[in-house]
Image (tube, rainbow, N blue to C red):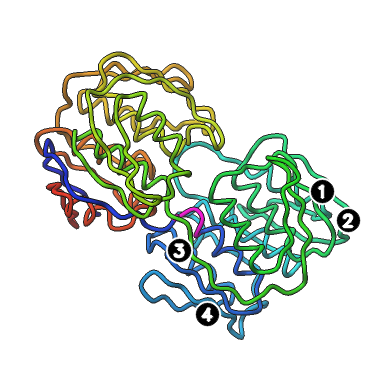
Amino acid sequence: MKKIIIYGGKKLHGSISISGSKNSSLAILASSMLFEKKVVLKNIPIVEDIKTMIKLLIYLGKNIKVKKKTIEITNSKKFGKSFIAPYELVKTMRAGILVLGPLISKFKKAKVSLPGGCAIGARPIDLHLKFLKSIGVRNYIDKGYVISKLNNIKKKNIYRFKKISVGATINSILASCLIPNKIILNNIATEPEIIDLIKFLKKAGIKIKFLSNRKIEILGKKYLNQISYEIMPDRIEAGTYMIASAITNSKLTIKKLNINHVQNTINYLSKANIKVKKIDKNSVQILPGKIKSVSFKTSPYPGFASDMQAQFMSLMNFANGTSKIKEEIFENRFLHVSELNRMGADISIMKNVATIKGVEKLRAAEVMATDLRASVSLVLAGLATKGKTVINRIYHLERGYEDLVYKLKNCGAKIKKINV
């Protein structure tokens, strides 16, 4: 089992470069199942979720070459002979469900294990299946697998999601790509990762246009173009390191980000008395100050990202005053609270609202990571706390953060990863 050990209470300095977006990479990698021709993807973060997705694509008949942060994808002789995404490859990664849409679009059938990943609530896939049903797919669940078959494609389809869902939006777009009929999706998620996927698909020859802010029209085609594409920067990683700067009262420069994608984080840091200075279109400098309490609720983009909630909660532990955080995207996403309280935080929970009373300091302790973002919130707390903090079960962290220990160590953090 791997652990991270932090000797905290030290200021950081220098700069951190942001990796490619994990979530955008996963969606675009899944979309490669639609292609007969070569796909080259650049700026891919080599994290555990990406490695798992690569294994899944190879299982489904793809040849994949990885060179540093570039992935080249072509078809092997096995492509088109397997339509099953097995439990062994999907159990640790929620994004495995994203091959369902491409398999339906390409081969008209699929058998995909129900997803695993973080322990942050049920996150059902009913919204995915309802769209598939609307275009003529028959779905049923048997022994932990979704089994789907496309029979008669409806000539015209207009579908409105009852609830905004990132995963359902991605799967629905991918399921529509090789269908020659016009499909209109309404009330879609518009996170930057989805916009990145749409840009990629348009470059590959799919006709997609926005009819309004959350409404798109898709006209698919049978064969997609050969393509080379660079993945967008990871906005959640960028926001995480901004908070690392603020929570340690340090001046850090964050490079290779998309400032537009992190504007919401910048706004809330500003409310917390943390200044973010724009250096150029891809770089910002964090100028720390005495942390003020800020309250917020999570909501779909462009609102406050649920994936930034745990990190901001760590920051609010050091704020002057009381903050309230309302989690409206996922259930059971306060698993980090008990671990932060072990370190001396004063956080209480009532249903989906956490109340954080700022404290003067935390105490170093041994804690347990429960999900991807919770684990990095504990890293942030450890960086800001004098003494030795030990974080157990860090495989969650390795699913989504590329070279985190290396990047922080380069900025002066006393941090190491050990195998026990």
User: Which circle marks residue 63 in the picture?
Assistant: 4
Residue that lies at the very extreme toward the left in this rendered image: 387
Question: Residue 394: image x %, image y %?
Answer: 29, 49
Reply above or below: 318 against 4: above
Q: Main secondary structure of the magenta part?
A: helix
Q: Which residues are magenta?
A: 21-25
The mark nearer the N terminus, 2 or 1, is: 1
Judge from the rendering whether residue 178 lies leftward or rightward of residue 61; answer left or right: right
Residue that lies at the very extreme toward the right in this rendered image: 155
Which residue has dot 3 on it?
52
Question: Residue 259: image x %, image y %?
Answer: 43, 45
Few, some or many residues within 10 Å of mark 3 (<14, 14–19, 20+): many
Marks 2 and 3 sit apart, C-alpha to C-alpha, by: 34 Å
On whether residue 309 falls in the magenta region, the answer is: no
Which residue has dot 2 on it?
154
Q: Secondary structure at mark 3?
A: helix
Marks 4 and 2 sit apart, C-alpha to C-alpha, by: 33 Å
Q: Secondary structure at mark 1?
A: helix
CB under 8 Å between discs 2 and 1: yes
In front here: 293 or 263? 263
Question: Residue 236: image x %, image y %?
Answer: 41, 45
Which residue has dot 1 on it?
134
On the image, which quarter does residue 191 sit in? top right
Q: Secondary structure at mark 4?
A: strand
Q: Amino acid at mark 3?
A: Thr
The mark nearer the N terminus, 2 or 3, is: 3
Circle 2 or circle 3, nearest the eye? 2
Q: Residue at x 32, y 14 (%)?
A: 322
Marks 4 and 3 sit apart, C-alpha to C-alpha, by: 14 Å
Q: Amino acid at mark 2?
A: Lys
